[in-house]
Image: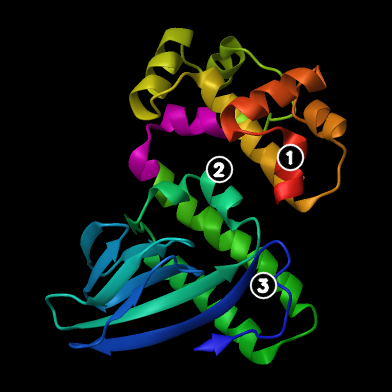
Amino acid sequence: MLTISGLKPGVLIVRHAGNSIWHKGALIARKKSDLFGIELISAGNLYFVQNGKEYVVEPGNIIIKKRGGNHLYKPGPAGFVHKRFIRLDGPIIETITGELDIDEIDVCRLSHPQQFAALQKKAITLIKDQPDGYVMRLSLLALEILLFVAQDVTSSRYPAALYASIDFLRRNLHRKIAISDMSRAVGISDTQLFRLFKTHLKESPLAYFNAMKLKRAAELLRHTLIPLKEIAFSLGYGEPAYFTNQFRKVMGMSPRAYRKKS
């Protein structure tokens, strides 16, 4: 295993990367883990438990070990497991994985596991050789890995039109938009769009959009000193007071109190 130590993680970085072979009897259990990791099973299988959900993970699948979660893993029925792993670090991991819907998944089958393996090998090389600019390159690589995984996570859960709608919303957080803007952008009717969101996300398109905005606001409050008024305007809220009311409804406190607490 290769590890970067003694470095500030910045907003996002690959912190560890490596390969491991486990045999029967090996076991790790963690409560409220401080790690976020993605592991690709390449041979054998893995018994994996996260927050009470149990899985037997076969080759070609990844497990996503979430920061703050309770998990246990050991070789599965095959009696051994070969796996490739990557550990990511940084204060915005939860924000990014939330927006990409990775935080909803424990196990996912990759359509191109060899591409994940190539990204993981790249991380190992950067950590080992430490060329000029390697910290920045590891930050960019961390984002590339999450975007790569998100393609399979989202396509396995949502219809293409819903994924396109979510992507449209993500790119337009700075705007005030209507359902008709979304439906026109993805080529379906307002009724179809509303049904997709209610069926798969259990809320209306506009409620989902507002939640996305407030997640971004929380990130800006935690990690920047941007004035509250500017945050409100940057997220399409015409009135700072309305933004404050919406934030309080979801977060249980005002933006100012949230920033002070963070």
First of labels 3, 2 by sequence position:
2
When asked about the image quadrant of residue 129, the answer is bottom right
Residue, disc 3: 138
> Is there any visible trace of residue 229 in the rendered image?
yes
The amino acid at mark 2 is Glu
Q: Secondary structure at mark 2?
A: helix
253 on left or right of 240: left
216 on left or right of 96: right
Instruction: For marks 3 and 2, give the CA distance.
Output: 21 Å
The amino acid at mark 1 is Ala
**Mark 1 nearby-residue class (10 Å; few <14, some 14–19, many ≥20):** few
Instruction: For marks 3 and 1, give the CA distance.
Output: 34 Å
Residue, disc 2: 99
The amino acid at mark 3 is Leu
**Residue drawn at (15%, 83%) of the image:** 79
When asked about the image quadrant of residue 45, the answer is bottom left
In the rendered image, residue 177 lying in the magenta stretch gets the answer no
Tag in front: 1 or 2:
1
**Magenta segment range?**
155-168
Residue 116: x and y in percent read 46, 67
First of labels 1, 2 by sequence position:
2
**Residue drawn at (45%, 28%) of the image:** 162
First of labels 3, 1 by sequence position:
3
The answer to which of 37 and 190 lies nearer the viewer is 37
Report the number of discs: 3
Q: Secondary structure at mark 1?
A: helix
When asked about the image quadrant of residue 84, the answer is bottom left
Q: Residue furthest left?
A: 77
**Mark 2 nearby-residue class (10 Å; few <14, some 14–19, many ≥20):** some
